[in-house]
Amino acid sequence: MNDSDMQHLRRCIELATEALEAGDEPFGSVLVSADGKVLAEDRNRIASGDSTRHPEFALARWAAENMPPEERAKATVYTSGEHCPMCAAAHGWVRLGRIVYVSSSEQLTVWLTELGVALPPVRSLPIQDIALDVPVEGPVAGLDEEVHELHRRLHAGA
Ligand SMILES: [Zn+2]
């Protein structure tokens, strides 16, 4: 984990904050090429009524449409929260490369349980249980507390 990784992860948290403030859930992701260029970024957009509008899914589709396979394999997806099984599958199907996440799905499950919030309708599984041969790094101590705070804000008063 170097300075550039941290910079991209901070951008994911900014995007997650933007999502929260727009009435969506606090998740944000950035797709970065092998040479360190930000190719695309997105945030959760489920307030539209479509609960599949996760940023990691959007980035996998963007990569499939815009990147040749050899570039996808060398790219990195940074994200505020570990991919859900749907997004991990999309990442695996389009054969993207490394994933770096701030907070894990396991942490999210603990946080939601502590907040007394209903768990999502899709089982929480580690990325490696879904997408094979994808290098995965996370969670990131310190930054994960910022994501925790966004989830507290989401469910405040719930
Ligand atoms: Zn997802």
Image (tube, rainbow, N blue to C red):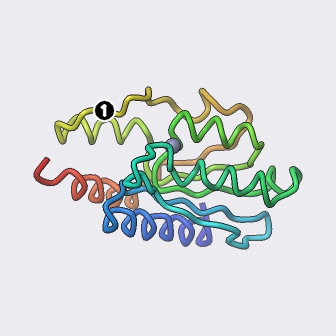
Towards the viewer: 6 or 75: 75
Relative height, residue 21 to residue 91 (above, below): below
Give the residue drawn at x 20%, y 50%: 155
Does 60 sit left or right of 54 as displayed? right
At label 1, the amino acid type is Leu
Residue 76 lies in quadrant: bottom right
Within 10 Å of the Cα at label 1, are there few (<14), some (14-19), or many (20+) other Cα atoms? few
- Residue placed furthest toward the front: 49
Q: Position of residue 142 (x, y in %)?
A: 37, 59
- From this viewpoint, which residue is outermost toward the left? 157
Residue at 75% from the left image edge and 65% from the top image edge: 33
Instruction: Work out which quarter of the rendered image holds the N terminus and state it.
Output: bottom right
Residue to which mark 1 is pinned: 119
Residue sitting at x 44%, y 43%? 51
The kind of secondary structure element at disc 1 is loop
Q: Is residue 39 above or below residue 113?
A: below
State left or right for residue 132 relative to residue 107: right
| Closer-to-camera residue (107/15) | 15
Please state the horizontal and vertical placement of residue 99, each as a whole percent of the image: 63, 49
Provide residue 149's location: percent of width, then percent of height: 27, 58
